[in-house]
Image: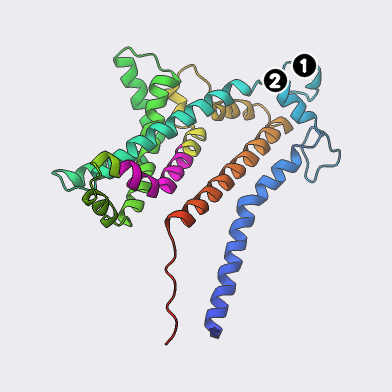
Amino acid sequence: MEVQTRGQRIFKFVSMGFLLLVLVALYAPLLVMTSLSFTEDQTSTFPPTDLSLISYEKLLHPDRIELFTIAGEPITDYWGPLQLSLVLGVLTAVVATVLGLSAAVAFRQQFRGRNSLFFVLLLGMIAPGIVVGLGIRLLATAIELEPRWYTTGLLVHVGWTLPFSFVIFMIFLNRFDRQIEEAASMLGATALQVFRHVTLPILRPAVLASLLFGFTLSFDELQRSALALGQDISLPRALVSVTTIRVTPVVYSLGAIIAIASLALVLVYLIMFERDAKKLYVPVAEKDDE
């Protein structure tokens, strides 16, 4: 058994304490928001005193006007914007993953202008969102293209998520043992068969990570969507317009549902990642001490 020194124990204690503070900073607001979603008070004081499910009932039935008794409470149907954000997020994740994987595979080869193209692909990651959205809106106006979620909206979301997908695949491919592909080629497999039966299964954790990252970034996008979506209202735009009037427990209930769904999605990804890791990465048995 390895004995730790005093410095190592102190470093471990400080690291664990810092990790605990980070976890509290991340998840404490979610717990507070979830608890406030069960309050019936107009001021949403914490901790809540009168527990009720009325905010969830308002969220599910925005057409029941008699439920909205708080003065100045906005009556908003969130399900249309939520559906649009879900569809846009899924399409963005799929398109960005396909393009990111294609670009990362192409970058495994040396070609002229490779370094310049690499930085061009990463430009969408650092460009200011409001500037990108304005540029896309001006371009659409110049070519007489109506700004909608399936035209300029999808374009700007893919441009935002593509660099992250590309980086994810580049990280996985840099740790990829190409001798596996060479062995499959020597056994008579075509380039398409090697990619389908060898490369893609090994990259499946990267594909899942890219899909999750792309969907999350698209679902939460506001700056680029403010001008690029046109008359279509995504969920972030709907929340911003509502919270400028008044924040009520209905917003907290929507946030709690999204937070729980997000955590469940991450949990599913971790389970699938762990399952793939056990299948693809078999640990080498340690040799017995002589």
In the picture shown, does residue 170 fall above or below 101? below
Name the residue carrying label 2.
Answer: 75
Neighbour tally class for label 2: few under 14, some 14-19, many 20 plus, Cα within 10 Å: some
Q: Residue at x 25, y 54 (%)?
A: 183
Residue depicted at x 58% and y 58%: 22
Q: Nearer the viewer, residue 201 or 263?
A: 201
Contact, mark 1 vs mark 2 (Cβ under 8 Å):
yes
Q: Any mark on residue 65, and which?
A: 1
Relative to 199, 45 lies left or right: right
Image height of 70 relative to 189, above or below: above
Q: Residue furthest front?
A: 187
> Residue 52, can we see it?
yes
Q: Residue at x 44, y 85 (%)?
A: 289
Residue 287 horizontal side relative to residue 139, left or right: right
Question: Which residue of the protein is positioned furthest toward the top in this rendering?
Answer: 144
Q: Quadrant of residue 252?
A: top right
Q: Alpha-carbon distance for marks 1 and 2?
A: 8 Å
Examine the rendering and report whether any part of residue 73 can be seen: no
Would you say residue 14 sits in the magenta stretch?
Answer: no
Q: Quadrant of the N terminus?
A: bottom right
Q: Is residue 130 left or right of residue 273?
A: left
